[in-house]
Amino acid sequence: MKITIDEFNDKRQCLFQTAPVDDWPLEETIAELRSASEQRPTVASKLNTARHLLIQPRSGVSDHAGMLTLLGQLQHADIGSITIDAYTRLNLWEKARTETRLNGYPLVTRGVLLGRELLASVPIPLEVRHGSPNGCLLAETAFACGITSFEGGGISYNLPYCKDVALKRSLSDWQYVDRLTGLLTEASGVLIDREGFGTLTAVLVPPSTSIAISILEMLLAVEQGVRCVTISYPESGNLVQDVSALRVIPRLAKTHADQVAPGTNPTIFTAMHQWMGVFPTNQSQAHKLISYGVLAGIAGRATKLINKTTEEALGLPTAQANATAIAYCQELVAYFAEHADAIDELCNQIDAAVNIEQSLIEREVNEILSAVYSLGTDDLVSSITRAFQLGILDIPFPASRHARGAVLPARDSDGAIRYLNYGGLSVSPATRRLNHDRLREKVNFSYAAILKDVYYMSAGNSLQANCGRRILMDKFEESSWRRS
């Protein structure tokens, strides 16, 4: 249900009563959004005018001068990021203010003026990426800085991260974020992007689980007036499955928006997260894994790609590694643009398999969402909360006790992620048979086999000869761009 203006104002007043910063009028945020959008493209305009796969890094350090330097080092990216520290994500304001070694930038306690300085330091638009079950004050701060994209949602930034944050609470808090986004978009005329986090737990997430939850978060957002949504998807490592999922997202999102929120007509973009699991320690294999992600993103027609680096297996990557990875991905994008005929040939080779995979993903998504809708669509927050309680919504390996975690994924013989056990998901017997037919070799279940599937990508399986993609990469590796 849409939050009324009076309800929003009451929530906003309560929010700032306990905030570590003084209140500011929304009129000031509106003016800043307009001013900032005159100085550089917004994230939405960048996505809307993209003629190729855009590359966006993660980046965040606690020191303000260090964050300025980092953004400067990464400003050749198409879109920039401010990744937020763990204390700010959990609204632990005093620790965010006083601790000096944080795993991200504490935007709220650094303050709006310093945030505006970060944005003004680079010519590219910025997005705030974090992981908070309650991003209300962070969103207020980000938008007041002139930042035009905000990541997260009440499901995806709660269940994979938090042990015991009630789902109804996080969904309600994110309704505020979405209502704020909608109000500011309408008042300023600046289209603000709201990006979901389809990656979820990042461990063997079946595409239909990621997409179904992303669509629910999209529906919650557009209900509050959001007009621009980016739906993200976590790379699986199987080319057919990744291409199928990326291509089917816009169609599924539009279908369900028309069904549940008719007339909203949101602008939909797609983002692909390069492999979020364990990376290979071998540099050559890490490069191949990064290369595969670019290829899959292009073939899947993703709008942008959230890139990784060759140092992922070693800990937090250095700024130089991040900058190098951005340039490497951009060079790959340019290279594949020059070899569009080879991309077309590759897509033609996998077209039949993609059609079959898309059909299965669509069936699973539609059946999962239909079960949620049967609980009612007038109050989606209550329906989603009840669906997780019943197990008809679920995610694999959740951190939260508010999801059952009964869904058990596994890879089939081609490396695609399937459901070894659907748990309580309300999926038809016919769909179950289609899925299980692809897992015949895993009839004898063992946790050791699942663990092997978790480490599938780190073992160098991402760019083996599969559907002809090796040919493209051989050509690239023979070109002038070489990385040892």
Image (tube, rainbow, N blue to C red):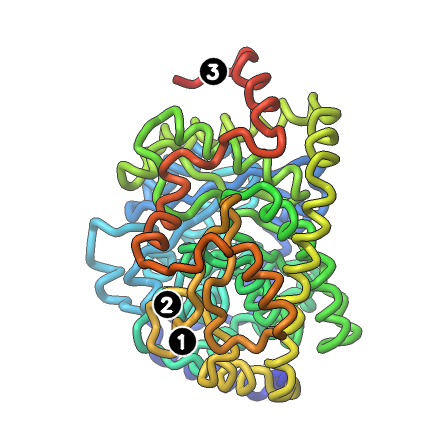
Residue plotted at (44% across, 84% down):
389
Q: Which residue is mark 2?
A: 398
Report which quarter residue 377 is drawn in.
bottom right
> In this view of the protein, which residue sits in the foreground, 465 or 482?
465
Horizontally, residue 479 falls left or right of residue 366, namely left
Q: Secondary structure at mark 2?
A: loop
Q: Amino acid at mark 2?
A: Pro
Q: Nearer the viewer, mark 3 or mark 1?
A: 1
Discs 2, 1 touching: Cβ within 8 Å: yes
Alpha carbon distance from label 2 to label 1: 7 Å
Instruction: Specify the label residue 482 is tagged with.
Output: 3
The image shows residue 171 at horizontal and vertical percentages of 49, 77
Q: Amino acid at mark 1?
A: Ala
Mark 3 or mark 2, which has the lower sequence index? Answer: 2
Mark 3 or mark 1, which has the lower sequence index? Answer: 1
Q: Nearer the viewer, mark 3 or mark 2?
A: 2
Task: State which quarter of the image contains the N terminus.
Answer: bottom right
Horizontally, residue 221 falls left or right of residue 338, namely left
Q: Residues within 10 Å of mark 3 (few under 14, many from 20)?
A: few
Q: Secondary structure at mark 1?
A: loop
Residue plotted at (75% across, 67% down):
255
Q: Which residue is mark 1?
A: 403
Report which quarter residue 349 is drawn in.
top right
